[in-house]
Amino acid sequence: MADHGDGAGALTSLIGRRAETARIAGLLSGARLVTLTGVGGGGKTRLALRVASDVAGSFPDGVHVAELADPRDPELLATSVLGTLDVARPGRPGADATAALVARLGERRVLLVLDNCEHLVDACARLADTLLRCAPRAACAGDEPAAAQDRGRAGLSGGAAARAGGG
Ligand SMILES: Nc1ncnc2c1ncn2[C@@H]1O[C@H](COP(=O)(O)OP(=O)(O)OP(=O)(O)O)[C@@H](O)[C@H]1O
Ligand SMILES: [Mg+2]
């Protein structure tokens, strides 16, 4: 897993988040989809990466972090996630990439972190739903703006939700 700032070699420590980290790791042991929600800049990414590092031992086939702030097109989402798995991208983006992702995940016990996907939350929800239905041992962690939760959503597609910063 790439070091995004809180793994070995991090230059700063994650302050005051030990209980929260343990709580989210606990959620991931019971749910295959966990959504972190909270205000922008509130530490969702930092927390997600810390949890991913802590639970890596439970995912022998790997922890993969897909940084999704860049793709603006939902069709490119699966292609971006595929890129984190070191799989050659299919010629056409979209459905083919999702199929390639499902084929790659298969029975593998992996954790996918869908990071900074707030602007593509519906597409991420659909992708996570497909992956979790088709890859029975995979798990996903992602983030979602607090506003979406307040409108009544319960995580990316009905998984466990934790509010970064408490709640
Ligand atoms: N508990 C913490 N201890 C130390 N630094 C923190 C903590 N939480 C957040 N930070 C720092 O605050 C900044 C923003 O954190 P981060 O990118 O994780 O927030 P975010 O909620 O994912 O933001 P966005 O909504 O933009 O995706 C980063 O520089 C991060 O290192
Ligand atoms: Mg973030």
Image (cartoon, grey):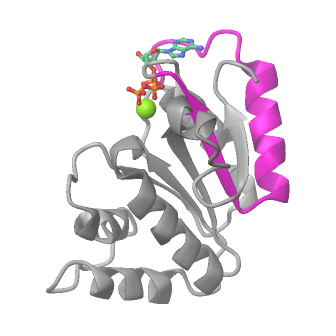
- The number of numbered badges drawn on the structure is 0
Q: Looking at the picture, does residue 74 appear above or below residue 164? A: below
Dividing the image into 4 quarters, which one contains the C terminus? top right
Occupied quadrant, residue 77: bottom left
Q: Looking at the picture, does residue 15 appear above or below residue 152? A: above
Q: Looking at the picture, does residue 155 appear above or below residue 11? A: below
In the displayed structure image, the side of residue 73 where residue 40 appears, left or right: right
- Residue at the spot 59% in from the left edge and 29% down from the top edge: 47
Q: Looking at the picture, does residue 38 appear above or below residue 162? A: above
Visible residue check, residue 8: no
The reply to whether the magenta stretch includes residue 165 is: no
Location of residue 132 in the rendering, given as x and y in whole percent from the top left corner: 62, 74
Of 101 and 74, which appears nearest the observer?
74
- Residue at the spot 53% in from the left edge and 67% down from the top edge: 128
Location of residue 116 in the rendering, given as x and y in whole percent from the top left corner: 40, 40
Visible residue check, residue 167: yes
- Residue at the spot 29% in from the left edge and 42% down from the top edge: 69
Q: Which residues are magenta?
A: 10-39
Occupied quadrant, residue 60: bottom right
Location of residue 50 in the rendering, given as x and y in whole percent from the top left corner: 61, 33
Location of residue 76 in the rendering, given as x and y in whole percent from the top left corner: 24, 66
